Amino acid sequence: MTNKNEELRMFQEKYLDFLEGGHDAPPTLENLGDEERRLAEAFIETIKAARGIDPYASRPSIEQLLESRSEKADTHRKFGTGLQLHLRETVDPEAVVSVDTASDATGLDSI
Protein backbone atom coordinates (compact mmCIF):
# COMPACT_ATOMS: atom_id res chain seq x y z
CA MET A 1 0.00 0.00 0.00
CA THR A 2 1.36 3.41 -0.88
CA ASN A 3 1.41 6.33 1.52
CA LYS A 4 -1.28 8.06 -0.58
CA ASN A 5 -3.62 5.09 -0.24
CA GLU A 6 -2.91 4.99 3.47
CA GLU A 7 -3.86 8.68 3.84
CA LEU A 8 -7.11 8.08 1.96
CA ARG A 9 -7.89 4.99 4.03
CA MET A 10 -7.25 6.92 7.26
CA PHE A 11 -9.52 9.75 6.05
CA GLN A 12 -12.28 7.24 5.32
CA GLU A 13 -11.94 5.67 8.75
CA LYS A 14 -12.03 9.08 10.46
CA TYR A 15 -15.07 10.09 8.41
CA LEU A 16 -16.93 6.90 9.37
CA ASP A 17 -15.97 7.48 13.02
CA PHE A 18 -17.39 11.02 12.72
CA LEU A 19 -20.68 9.66 11.35
CA GLU A 20 -20.90 7.20 14.23
CA GLY A 21 -20.46 10.04 16.74
CA GLY A 22 -16.80 9.43 17.54
CA HIS A 23 -15.78 12.99 16.54
CA ASP A 24 -17.50 16.35 16.75
CA ALA A 25 -16.37 17.44 13.27
CA PRO A 26 -15.58 15.62 10.04
CA PRO A 27 -11.91 15.18 9.11
CA THR A 28 -10.39 17.78 6.80
CA LEU A 29 -9.18 17.16 3.28
CA GLU A 30 -6.16 19.45 3.70
CA ASN A 31 -3.42 16.82 3.85
CA LEU A 32 -4.73 14.89 0.82
CA GLY A 33 -3.36 15.33 -2.67
CA ASP A 34 -5.62 16.28 -5.58
CA GLU A 35 -6.42 12.70 -6.59
CA GLU A 36 -6.95 11.54 -3.01
CA ARG A 37 -9.13 14.59 -2.35
CA ARG A 38 -11.28 13.76 -5.39
CA LEU A 39 -11.62 10.16 -4.18
CA ALA A 40 -12.41 11.32 -0.64
CA GLU A 41 -15.10 13.69 -1.92
CA ALA A 42 -16.60 10.85 -3.99
CA PHE A 43 -16.51 8.65 -0.87
CA ILE A 44 -18.37 11.32 1.12
CA GLU A 45 -21.04 11.69 -1.58
CA THR A 46 -21.49 7.93 -1.74
CA ILE A 47 -21.91 7.71 2.02
CA LYS A 48 -24.43 10.57 1.98
CA ALA A 49 -26.43 8.84 -0.74
CA ALA A 50 -26.29 5.50 1.07
CA ARG A 51 -27.50 7.04 4.34
CA GLY A 52 -30.74 8.02 2.60
CA ILE A 53 -31.50 4.45 1.57
CA ASP A 54 -34.03 2.66 3.74
CA PRO A 55 -32.93 -1.00 3.94
CA TYR A 56 -36.40 -1.98 5.12
CA ALA A 57 -38.29 -0.27 2.30
CA SER A 58 -40.25 -2.57 0.05
CA ARG A 59 -38.81 -2.90 -3.42
CA PRO A 60 -40.94 -2.83 -6.55
CA SER A 61 -41.58 -6.14 -8.25
CA ILE A 62 -40.16 -6.95 -11.67
CA GLU A 63 -43.66 -6.56 -13.08
CA GLN A 64 -43.95 -3.05 -11.63
CA LEU A 65 -40.54 -2.06 -13.01
CA LEU A 66 -41.43 -3.38 -16.47
CA GLU A 67 -44.79 -1.62 -16.37
CA SER A 68 -43.12 1.66 -15.39
CA ARG A 69 -40.62 1.28 -18.22
CA SER A 70 -43.43 0.53 -20.65
CA GLU A 71 -45.33 3.65 -19.53
CA LYS A 72 -42.23 5.80 -20.05
CA ALA A 73 -41.69 4.30 -23.50
CA ASP A 74 -45.32 5.04 -24.38
CA THR A 75 -44.93 8.63 -23.18
CA HIS A 76 -41.78 9.11 -25.27
CA ARG A 77 -43.46 7.54 -28.28
CA LYS A 78 -46.51 9.81 -27.91
CA PHE A 79 -44.25 12.85 -27.53
CA GLY A 80 -42.30 11.90 -30.66
CA THR A 81 -45.48 11.38 -32.66
CA GLY A 82 -46.92 14.69 -31.44
CA LEU A 83 -43.70 16.49 -32.29
CA GLN A 84 -43.68 15.05 -35.82
CA LEU A 85 -47.30 16.09 -36.37
CA HIS A 86 -46.57 19.59 -35.10
CA LEU A 87 -43.56 19.94 -37.38
CA ARG A 88 -45.55 18.72 -40.39
CA GLU A 89 -48.22 21.33 -39.69
CA THR A 90 -45.94 24.27 -38.96
CA VAL A 91 -42.76 23.90 -41.04
CA ASP A 92 -42.58 25.63 -44.40
CA PRO A 93 -43.25 22.99 -47.07
CA GLU A 94 -40.47 24.53 -49.17
CA ALA A 95 -37.90 24.12 -46.38
CA VAL A 96 -34.94 21.84 -47.01
CA VAL A 97 -34.37 19.33 -44.24
CA SER A 98 -30.91 17.93 -43.64
CA VAL A 99 -29.65 15.55 -40.98
CA ASP A 100 -26.85 16.79 -38.76
CA THR A 101 -25.65 13.69 -36.92
CA ALA A 102 -23.04 15.60 -34.88
CA SER A 103 -25.73 17.87 -33.44
CA ASP A 104 -28.03 14.91 -32.89
CA ALA A 105 -25.32 13.11 -30.91
CA THR A 106 -24.56 16.23 -28.85
CA GLY A 107 -28.24 16.70 -28.10
CA LEU A 108 -28.70 13.09 -27.07
CA ASP A 109 -25.59 13.20 -24.86
CA SER A 110 -27.05 16.14 -22.98
CA ILE A 111 -30.06 14.12 -21.78
Image: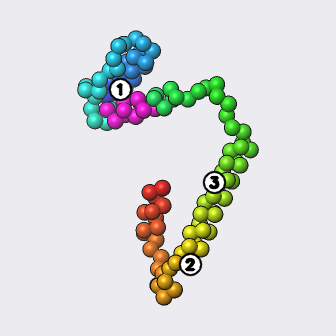
Real-space Cα separation, disc 2 to disc 1, in angstroms: 58 Å
The kind of residue tagged 2 is Arg
Q: Residues within 10 Å of mark 1 (few under 14, many from 20)?
A: many
Which residue is situated farthest in the bottom direction here? 94
Q: Residues within 10 Å of mark 3 (few under 14, many from 20)?
A: few
Question: Closer to the camera, 35 or 105?
Answer: 105
Q: Which segment is the magenta one? A: 37-46
* Residue on which disc 1 sits: 8
Which secondary structure, mark 2? helix
Quadrant of the image for the N terminus? top left
Distance between mark 1 and mark 3 Cα atoms: 42 Å
35 with respect to 90 (left or right): left
Q: Residue 109, relative to residue 48: is it above or below?
A: below
User: In the rendered image, which quarter is residue 36 located in?
Assistant: top left
- Measured from the top left, where is residue 8 in percent x and y? 35, 26
Viewer-side residue, 26 vs 6? 26
- Of labels 2 and 1, earlier in sequence is 1
- Amino acid type at circle 1 is Leu
| Residue 38 pos. (x, y %) | 34, 36
Contact? badges 2 and 1 (CB < 8 Å): no
Residue tagged 3: 72
